[in-house]
Image (cartoon, rainbow, N blue to C red):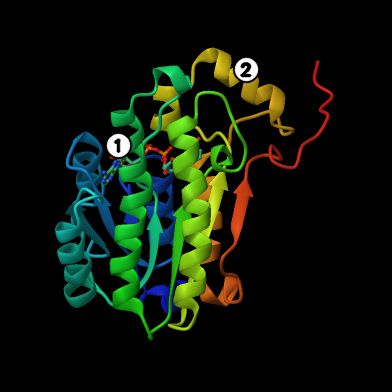
């Protein structure tokens, strides 16, 4: 789609103020879309407000994705007053790397609540609005939801749930003209990874990722944009696309 054709398209990006969501916001704006950023109030959202001050193609909402009422109100506000909703990228999420013995039920519940229930709530509200008109939802799973990696009992379980949620929503919503897919990133250099990955994690990923490097947020954003664009991916739904430098497909790796 050309920049001009995308002018009438409005996408909500949760977690749009940091990392993968931030890169997706920048790419979609570059391609002519209107973008509604849903993120927690804080430094990242403040900085993003400043960055796009005066840009009428950006809408800001301080929203916790687990707050069903607020999400419902803000999705309606975007669709009614900013631009008819055509897509959603569910990029909000949190992570932890803790051995199963060190993972409390509170932490487990919190990660499931934000990563899974939050994705479900925003997806459902957006789908209600786009129903019958057409639209695309992109969720963010992870290679940690496809393979068992150390320390990922809560995070990995949440991302495994995103895989199934994506497939079920794709089935339920196909008759309403909506597509639902997920991207499963490998290690991507973002503020989340800076906070969670130790040097030893970084060394391990370099060993196990055939491309021998971390990915960049832009490299996820471009795949999200592909999945949001009906002209590019109009017959793709219920799919989980790993963007991981070859991690998932790898067997023996010749690494010195
Ligand atoms: P990030 O920490 O840079 O960005 C996440 C954003 O989500 C932040 O702006 C944060 O404020 C927002 N957020 C967190 N909880 C929220 C809530 N309750 N309501 C609204 N917003 C909330 O992280 P990153 O790396 O960009 O992650 C984005 C997504 O990609 C997450 O779902 C993460 O699990 C997933 N992912 C990231 C990978 C990586 O290596 N960076 C690998 C695989 C998946």
For image coordinates 20% across by 55% down, the residue present is: 60
Taking 201 as reference, is 6 above or below it?
A: below
Say if residue 56 shows up in the picture: yes
Q: x and y percent of residue 191 in the render? A: 39, 30
Q: Is mark 1 within 8 Å of ligand 1?
A: no
Taking 87 as reference, is 54 above or below it?
A: above
Where on the picture, by quarter, is residue 195?
A: top left
Residue 203, numbered label? 2
Label 1 residue SS: helix
Position of 36 compared to 185: left or right?
A: left
Label 2 residue SS: helix
Position of 253 compared to 91: left or right?
A: right
| Mark 2 or 1, nearer chain start | 1
For image coordinates 84% across by 24% down, the residue present is: 254
Q: x and y percent of residue 74 in the render? A: 18, 63
Q: In which quarter of the image is the C terminus?
A: top right
- The 10 Å Cα crowd at callout 1, few under 14, some 14 to 19, many 20 or more, is some
Taking depth in this image into account, of 4 and 138 the one nearest to the observer is 138
Q: Does the residue labelled 2 lie within 8 Å of ligand 1?
A: no
Where on the picture, by quarter, is residue 34?
A: bottom left
Taking 101 as reference, is 78 above or below it?
A: below
For image coordinates 20% across by 59% down, the residue present is: 71
Position of 217 compared to 241: left or right?
A: left
For image coordinates 42% across by 74% down, the residue present is: 6
Q: How many marks?
A: 2
Residue 110, numbered label? 1
């Amino acid at each position: 789609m050309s920049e001009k054709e995308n002018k009438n398209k409005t996408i909500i990006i949760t977690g749009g103020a940091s990392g993968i969501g931030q890169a997706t916001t920048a790419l979609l704006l570059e391609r002519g879309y209107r973008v509604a950023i849903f993120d927690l109030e804080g430094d990242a959202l403040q900085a993003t407000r400043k960055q796009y001050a005066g840009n009428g193609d950006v809408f800001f909402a301080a929203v916790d994705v687990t707050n069903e009422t607020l999400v419902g109100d803000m999705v309606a506000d975007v669709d009614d007053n900013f631009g008819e909703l055509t897509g959603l990228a569910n990029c909000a999420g949190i992570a932890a790397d803790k051995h199963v013995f060190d993972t409390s039920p509170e932490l487990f519940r919190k990660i499931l609540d934000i990563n899974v229930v939050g994705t479900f709530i925003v997806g459902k509200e957006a789908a209600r609005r786009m129903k019958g008109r057409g639209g695309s939802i992109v969720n963010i799973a992870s290679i940690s939801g496809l393979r068992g990696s150390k320390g990922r009992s809560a995070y990995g379980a949440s991302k495994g749930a995103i895989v199934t949620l994506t497939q079920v929503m794709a089935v339920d919503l196909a008759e309403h003209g909506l597509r639902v897919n997920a991207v499963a990133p490998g290690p991507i250099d973002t503020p989340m990874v800076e906070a969670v990955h130790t040097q030893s994690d970084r060394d391990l990923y370099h060993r196990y990722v055939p491309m021998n490097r971390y990915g960049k947020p832009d490299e996820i954003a471009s795949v999200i944009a592909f999945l949001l664009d009906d002209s590019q991916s109009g017959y793709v739904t219920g799919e989980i696309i790993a963007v991981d430098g070859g991690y998932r497909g790898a067997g023996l790796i010749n690494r010195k």
